[in-house]
Image (cartoon, rainbow, N blue to C red):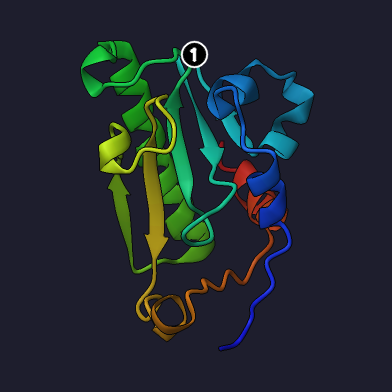
Amino acid sequence: MKVVWAPWRIDFIETAPKNCIFCDAIKANKKFDRENLILYRGKSSFIIMNKYPYNNGHLMFVPIRHISKISELTKGELAEIFSMVNQSEKCLKEKFKPHGFNFGANIGEDAGAGFEHLHFHLVPRWRGDTNFMPVIGEVKVLPEHLYRTYDKLKGCF
Protein backbone atom coordinates (compact mmCIF):
# COMPACT_ATOMS: atom_id res chain seq x y z
CA MET A 1 0.00 0.00 0.00
CA LYS A 2 1.24 3.48 -0.86
CA VAL A 3 0.82 6.27 1.65
CA VAL A 4 -0.22 9.68 0.39
CA TRP A 5 0.28 12.53 2.81
CA ALA A 6 -2.43 15.19 3.10
CA PRO A 7 -1.25 17.22 6.10
CA TRP A 8 -3.77 20.02 5.56
CA ARG A 9 -6.59 17.60 6.50
CA ILE A 10 -5.38 17.29 10.10
CA ASP A 11 -6.53 20.83 10.85
CA PHE A 12 -10.06 19.85 9.88
CA ILE A 13 -9.92 16.57 11.79
CA GLU A 14 -8.52 18.07 14.99
CA THR A 15 -10.62 21.21 14.94
CA ALA A 16 -13.94 19.98 13.57
CA PRO A 17 -16.14 23.06 13.67
CA LYS A 18 -18.70 23.26 16.46
CA ASN A 19 -20.39 26.29 14.95
CA CYS A 20 -21.93 26.55 11.50
CA ILE A 21 -19.05 27.17 9.06
CA PHE A 22 -21.31 29.14 6.73
CA CYS A 23 -22.73 31.41 9.44
CA ASP A 24 -19.23 32.04 10.81
CA ALA A 25 -17.84 32.84 7.34
CA ILE A 26 -20.58 35.30 6.35
CA LYS A 27 -20.53 37.05 9.77
CA ALA A 28 -16.77 37.62 9.55
CA ASN A 29 -15.43 40.96 8.39
CA LYS A 30 -15.31 41.30 4.60
CA LYS A 31 -11.55 41.81 4.79
CA PHE A 32 -11.31 38.07 5.58
CA ASP A 33 -13.34 36.97 2.53
CA ARG A 34 -10.27 35.53 0.76
CA GLU A 35 -9.23 33.53 3.84
CA ASN A 36 -12.83 32.35 4.24
CA LEU A 37 -13.07 31.66 0.48
CA ILE A 38 -16.14 33.89 0.03
CA LEU A 39 -16.23 34.97 -3.62
CA TYR A 40 -19.40 37.05 -3.51
CA ARG A 41 -21.82 38.45 -0.92
CA GLY A 42 -25.33 39.04 -2.16
CA LYS A 43 -28.35 40.52 -0.40
CA SER A 44 -29.68 37.20 0.88
CA SER A 45 -27.07 34.60 -0.12
CA PHE A 46 -23.41 34.20 -0.94
CA ILE A 47 -20.91 32.16 -2.96
CA ILE A 48 -18.16 30.32 -1.14
CA MET A 49 -15.52 27.93 -2.43
CA ASN A 50 -15.45 24.43 -1.00
CA LYS A 51 -12.40 24.18 1.29
CA TYR A 52 -12.18 20.44 0.51
CA PRO A 53 -13.26 20.46 -3.14
CA TYR A 54 -14.14 17.55 -5.33
CA ASN A 55 -12.54 19.42 -8.26
CA ASN A 56 -10.92 22.81 -8.69
CA GLY A 57 -13.61 25.47 -8.95
CA HIS A 58 -16.06 23.59 -6.67
CA LEU A 59 -18.45 26.34 -5.53
CA MET A 60 -21.23 26.45 -2.97
CA PHE A 61 -24.26 28.77 -2.91
CA VAL A 62 -25.58 29.49 0.55
CA PRO A 63 -28.53 31.49 1.88
CA ILE A 64 -27.40 33.87 4.62
CA ARG A 65 -30.28 32.73 6.82
CA HIS A 66 -29.50 29.48 8.65
CA ILE A 67 -32.16 27.20 7.17
CA SER A 68 -32.06 23.51 6.30
CA LYS A 69 -34.73 22.92 3.62
CA ILE A 70 -35.33 24.18 0.09
CA SER A 71 -38.97 24.78 1.07
CA GLU A 72 -37.77 27.40 3.57
CA LEU A 73 -36.18 29.57 0.87
CA THR A 74 -38.01 32.74 -0.06
CA LYS A 75 -38.64 33.57 -3.72
CA GLY A 76 -35.97 36.26 -3.44
CA GLU A 77 -33.40 33.83 -2.05
CA LEU A 78 -34.20 31.28 -4.75
CA ALA A 79 -33.88 33.90 -7.47
CA GLU A 80 -30.60 35.24 -6.11
CA ILE A 81 -29.05 31.79 -5.65
CA PHE A 82 -29.96 30.64 -9.15
CA SER A 83 -28.74 33.92 -10.61
CA MET A 84 -25.42 33.27 -8.85
CA VAL A 85 -25.33 29.71 -10.20
CA ASN A 86 -25.94 31.05 -13.70
CA GLN A 87 -23.15 33.62 -13.41
CA SER A 88 -20.81 31.06 -11.83
CA GLU A 89 -21.37 28.54 -14.62
CA LYS A 90 -20.37 31.21 -17.16
CA CYS A 91 -17.32 32.20 -15.10
CA LEU A 92 -16.14 28.62 -14.63
CA LYS A 93 -16.59 27.91 -18.35
CA GLU A 94 -14.45 30.94 -19.18
CA LYS A 95 -11.72 30.38 -16.59
CA PHE A 96 -11.44 26.57 -16.50
CA LYS A 97 -13.14 25.31 -19.69
CA PRO A 98 -14.82 22.28 -18.10
CA HIS A 99 -16.71 19.79 -20.25
CA GLY A 100 -19.68 19.66 -17.86
CA PHE A 101 -20.94 20.29 -14.34
CA ASN A 102 -22.55 18.53 -11.41
CA PHE A 103 -25.12 20.65 -9.58
CA GLY A 104 -27.08 19.68 -6.48
CA ALA A 105 -27.55 19.62 -2.75
CA ASN A 106 -27.38 17.11 0.07
CA ILE A 107 -30.35 17.84 2.29
CA GLY A 108 -30.35 16.12 5.66
CA GLU A 109 -27.75 13.98 7.40
CA ASP A 110 -29.00 10.76 5.80
CA ALA A 111 -28.53 12.34 2.36
CA GLY A 112 -24.89 13.11 3.12
CA ALA A 113 -25.22 16.70 4.34
CA GLY A 114 -22.30 17.53 6.59
CA PHE A 115 -23.97 20.74 7.78
CA GLU A 116 -27.59 21.57 8.47
CA HIS A 117 -27.23 24.96 6.77
CA LEU A 118 -28.73 24.54 3.30
CA HIS A 119 -26.27 24.96 0.46
CA PHE A 120 -25.96 23.99 -3.20
CA HIS A 121 -22.88 22.71 -5.02
CA LEU A 122 -21.64 23.44 -8.55
CA VAL A 123 -18.72 21.21 -9.51
CA PRO A 124 -16.87 21.58 -12.83
CA ARG A 125 -16.13 18.27 -14.56
CA TRP A 126 -13.69 17.30 -17.30
CA ARG A 127 -13.50 14.23 -19.48
CA GLY A 128 -11.24 11.80 -17.70
CA ASP A 129 -11.43 13.45 -14.28
CA THR A 130 -12.76 10.19 -12.91
CA ASN A 131 -9.66 8.05 -13.03
CA PHE A 132 -8.06 5.30 -11.00
CA MET A 133 -6.65 7.55 -8.25
CA PRO A 134 -9.88 7.93 -6.21
CA VAL A 135 -10.93 4.33 -6.84
CA ILE A 136 -7.68 2.44 -6.32
CA GLY A 137 -5.57 4.90 -4.37
CA GLU A 138 -8.40 6.58 -2.47
CA VAL A 139 -6.76 9.88 -3.44
CA LYS A 140 -8.04 12.89 -5.35
CA VAL A 141 -5.46 15.01 -7.15
CA LEU A 142 -6.21 18.73 -7.38
CA PRO A 143 -3.72 20.54 -9.59
CA GLU A 144 -4.28 24.09 -8.35
CA HIS A 145 -4.07 25.67 -4.88
CA LEU A 146 -7.35 27.02 -3.46
CA TYR A 147 -6.17 30.63 -3.25
CA ARG A 148 -4.95 30.58 -6.85
CA THR A 149 -8.40 29.35 -7.89
CA TYR A 150 -9.98 32.05 -5.69
CA ASP A 151 -7.92 34.77 -7.36
CA LYS A 152 -8.93 33.53 -10.82
CA LEU A 153 -12.63 33.50 -9.97
CA LYS A 154 -12.92 36.61 -7.79
CA GLY A 155 -12.92 38.92 -10.83
CA CYS A 156 -16.13 37.32 -12.11
CA PHE A 157 -18.24 38.69 -9.28
Q: Is residue 85 above or below residue 123?
A: above
Mark 1 element type: loop
Q: Nearer the viewer, residue 64 or 17?
A: 17
Residue 86 vs residue 64: left or right? Answer: left
Image position, residue 131 (x, y; %): 39, 82
Residue 152 vs residue 65: left or right? Answer: right
Residue 143 vs residue 122: left or right? Answer: right
> Residue at (56%, 19%) from the top-left corner?
23
Image position, residue 21 (x, y; %): 58, 28
Which quarter of the image is occupied by the C terminus? top right
Q: Nearer the viewer, residue 119 or 109?
A: 109
Q: Amino acid at mark 1?
A: Lys
> Residue at (60%, 26%) from the top-left corner?
18
The image quarter containing residue 73 is: top left
Q: Which residue is mark 1?
A: 43
Which quarter of the image is occupied by the N terminus? bottom right
The image quarter containing residue 142 is: bottom right
Could you classify mark 1 by the number of other residues whose Cα lies within 10 Å: few (under 14), some (14-19), or many (20 or more)?
A: few
How many tags in the picture?
1
Image position, residue 92 (x, y; %): 47, 54
Q: Nearer the viewer, residue 42 or 48?
A: 48
Q: Is residue 121 above or below residue 149?
A: above
> Residue at (43%, 38%) from the top-left corner?
114
Q: Is residue 143 above or below residue 75?
A: below
The image quarter containing residue 22 is: top right
> Residue at (48%, 16%) from the top-left corner?
64
Q: Residue furthest right?
A: 31
Image position, residue 101 (x, y; %): 32, 58
Q: Residue furthest left?
A: 71
Q: Nearer the viewer, residue 153 or 111?
A: 111
